[in-house]
Image: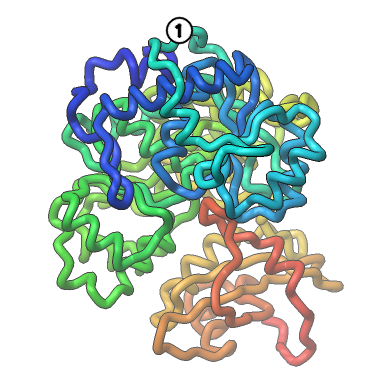
Amino acid sequence: METIYDTLFDNPAIVPDRECLAFRDRRSSFADLRARVTRLGNALTGLGVGKGDRVVVLLHNCSEFVEAFYAITSIGALIVPFNWRLHPNEHIALMKDCLPKAIISEREFIQLLERASREIMSLATVISTDIPTGGAYLNYEDLVSSASNAPLPRVAVASDDASILYTSGTTGMPKGAVLTHANCLADHDNVGSFAELDAQSVNLQTSPLYHAASMHTFMHVTFGGRTVMTPNFDAGEVLSLIAREKVTYIFGVPTVIYALLDHPDISRSDISSLKTFSYGAAPMSTVRFEEAVRVFGYIFIHAYGMTESSSHSSLLGKEDHRRFPGSVGRGLKHSRIKIVDSAGRAAPPGEIGEMLISGAQVMSRYWNRPDATAETLIDGWLHSGDLGMVDADGFLYVKDRKRDMIISGGVNVYPREIEEVIAGHPAVGEVAVYGIPDEKWGEAIAASVVLRNGHVAREEDIRGFVGGHLARFKIPRAVTFVAELPKNPSGKVLKRVLQESYRPRTDIPVG
């Protein structure tokens, strides 16, 4: 298989009459999906969408999103999924960047669709899943039901662009990572082979499809498996679906795992069908991981990667969690990672440096950003901006984001080390550590803490706890308690938001 088209239409792993997708009361076989994708692809072609054109998809999780993914990429166009949480001004800015030929959306965004029709000159077609055909809109179901069922021609090749995924924008304006068909298939093979997926695998998709985590659904199509999809994450519903649908595979960021662990029904829920729980975007604290293992067993695989590397670059296996806790594993089938020092030289085992990624899953470029592409892709290596190290066994450890490292009095301080200690406090549910301005030291350490339900702690409790485990200079200068940590859609904490909202105090002694 060379293209996304092949994974659906020319895939020996697929049994046509087997169920492929379940969403609410709607269940689709692979034959159903193929038929609807074919009709939608022909409809888009008839509307003038062709190879290289961009089609924005602004939908909540639904069957139509999956159909659109395969239809758009199968006719050689690029799918551009939009985060529905963004402000309309941000949506318009992204459209002005990618200049879509069409958009597939829903009634909730009608004001944005009206504005886009006026402001985006490239936009020729607006399709809605729940607005009747008429005026400026075409109804999605009308298009599918009336379109030709003639087989879609093969127009794409492996090196063609398949999608533009806009980065989460933790530090500024999102950049569009352009992924090819080959990138996507390499990522599917990387993870699917590692997790030993097959046609009997059942995926539970709770994370939004606009995010790179959608690959877990598309990967299951590649391996002939089934996906059960929810419109959003609800811990109680997830536990119920695992039991009812005999789910074998699920992906979740650590906060998802914490929510399941803290749900009152967890102890009486049937989770015996689960074989693999993939997590990523952020590490789990040691305390909470041990709790997760007691509940779920050693079924966890820890993913490391980024949008620019099609989501995955390394994985830590289930049994390796016993031997290499805290590691993100080793490079995968189609990927390689190396650690380099500030001069670009390979760092020896145990030495911290920047993590560089190469392989078939690395993006082709940033859309319309040759400057950013040149800064990020150098001599075939993707510069991740993450700091890490490799041990003597070749296992990788992420130490921190390069930009998150705190330099206090000329000393490098890695927030993740302090976060791991604070997370061990019995009252702490989540924590983020970050740098704040300090006239004397340049930067000082601050921590924002989310307490577990029913627990209390004071600032001095947290500072004293850190002092019992780490050097005095690593004790946070300030500790604030918050209801939740700000996160981007992939579950990464937005430390810049915490830094921007921090207000200096004068009543805290320097540690």
- Residue at 56 percent across and 14 percent down: it is 160
| Residue 412 x, y percent position in the rendering | 67, 57
Label 1 sits on a secondary structure element that is loop
Which amino acid is tagged 1? Pro
Q: Residue at x 43, y 12 (%)?
A: 152
- Where's the C terminus, which quadrant? bottom right
User: Outermost residue toward the front?
Assistant: 134
Q: Residue 416: name its quadrant.
A: bottom right
**Which residue is under mark 1?**
153
Between 91 and 167, the one lying in front of the other is 91
User: Which residue: 37% across, 39% down?
Assistant: 216
Q: Is residue 380 visible?
A: no
Rendered image quadrant of residue 383? top right
Q: Position of residue 306 (x, y in %)?
A: 54, 39
Describe residue 362's horizontal placement relative to residue 413 as left or right: left
Q: Quick one: 5 or 411, which is closer to the camera?
A: 5
Say if 460 sits above or below 328 in the image: below
